[in-house]
Amino acid sequence: MDEYDEEPPILVSEEQPAAASATSAPASLDDDRPPEVKVPVTIVTGHLGSGKTTLITRLLNDDKHGKRIAVILNEFGESSGIDKSLTMNKDGEMAEEWLELENGCLCCSIKDAGVKAVENLLKKKGRFDYIMLETTGLADPGPIASMFWLDDELQSEIYLDGIITVVDAKFGMAQLKEHSQDGTVNEAVRQIALADRIIFNKIDIVTDEAADELETAIRTINGAAPITRTTRSLVPIEQLLDLHCFDSVFQDPFAVSRKPAVANGASNHIDEAVGTIVFSAPGAVDLAKLDTWLQCLLWEGTLVGRGRLQDVEVLRLKALVNVSGDDRKHVVQAVRELYDKQQGARWENGEERINKVVIIGKQVKGIDFETSFRQNCLV
């Protein structure tokens, strides 16, 4: 552990309420906020010591965003201050406990990070503007993301806004090089592959060459997520909140994604099994055909027109598609076997109606997804 994760927020015991202020008391469930407004959830993941806790601490102690944020720490035992004060009870076991910050934000530690558990906790403490869920360093964010994303279809009061992965510039390469004994993708690679935003932290303690090499490795794994270089987890608020990465506000992955060129021998240092495929295709999509194509790929591990894909595992898929007979864009999102299609904004007059697809996964390189898409999804 280093100083990056040694900056807990100022906490106020519930037995000793903070001084009265406009933001210090939790809002009532009867406040002026419309009950139908859903609360966004951002998942923050990253290896032990990467700076996740420092990132969230800075956000909590920043009054500029004007939001009441609830932070949920899921089964922690790896960070300092904030985690220890939340997780210990008289038996030394994890327990549900809330600590109030001076600006009205709250922190909570719970074992069950399920959607209903989170909703029940928030009902006890009033409504919030935002929820940050910090995972353990070894957690695969996929199942957690799927849980919150799936429940959005069941009229949940919360919805998944995005996944942020914090990468340690000093130890990130070593973490990416680790190989799991069972041959599966290791946690560090999964965390990067599933990220919507990547915070490349602690770049001040490595050389420019080392930082460039690691960023190339990161981009090789995930060519769609914007990367922010930083020190001490200092990141602009707009890169953390209101990301809209799982709804119809499509953020063109082609603005970031390019088939990455591996430089300076970076490919020799990481497991090349996970990579990014990017392609575009003109024409109109038949939704029924698209569903079949997605279901074969995500559920059965097969590619229409080719058959079974040996050892292929799609971790994330994003697409913007032009649907036949519809003047609106359609956004497709997938996390592992779960996928969703949403109708988005209208196509602008004169705008090129082109389909754009990004696939991030294991053993996807060298597979002609584009031809299969063109032959089996277009009208």
Image: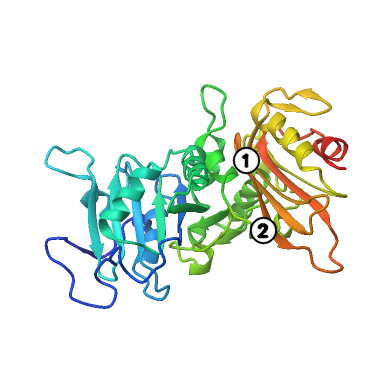
| Cβ atoms under marks 1 and 2 closer than 8 Å | no
Q: Nearer the viewer, residue 373 or 84?
A: 373
Question: At 34% from the left edge and 62% from the top edge, which residue is drawn?
Answer: 127
Answer few, some or many: residues within 10 Å of disc 1's Cα (few below 14, many 20 plus, some between 14 and 19): some
Q: Nearer the viewer, residue 196 or 35?
A: 35
Q: Is residue 306 left or right of residue 301?
A: right
Where does the image place residue 352, in percent across and percent down from the top left?
Answer: 85, 61
Residue 339 tag number: 1
Mark 1 or mark 2: whose residue is earlier in sequence: 2
Q: Helix, strand or loop at disc 2? A: loop
Please name the residue that numbered disc 2 is placed on.
Answer: 250
Q: Is residue 197 left or right of residue 134?
A: right
Q: Nearer the viewer, residue 106 or 343?
A: 343
Question: At 53% from the left edge and 33% from the top edge, which residue is drawn?
Answer: 186
Residue 165 tag number: none
Amino acid residing under circle 2 = Phe
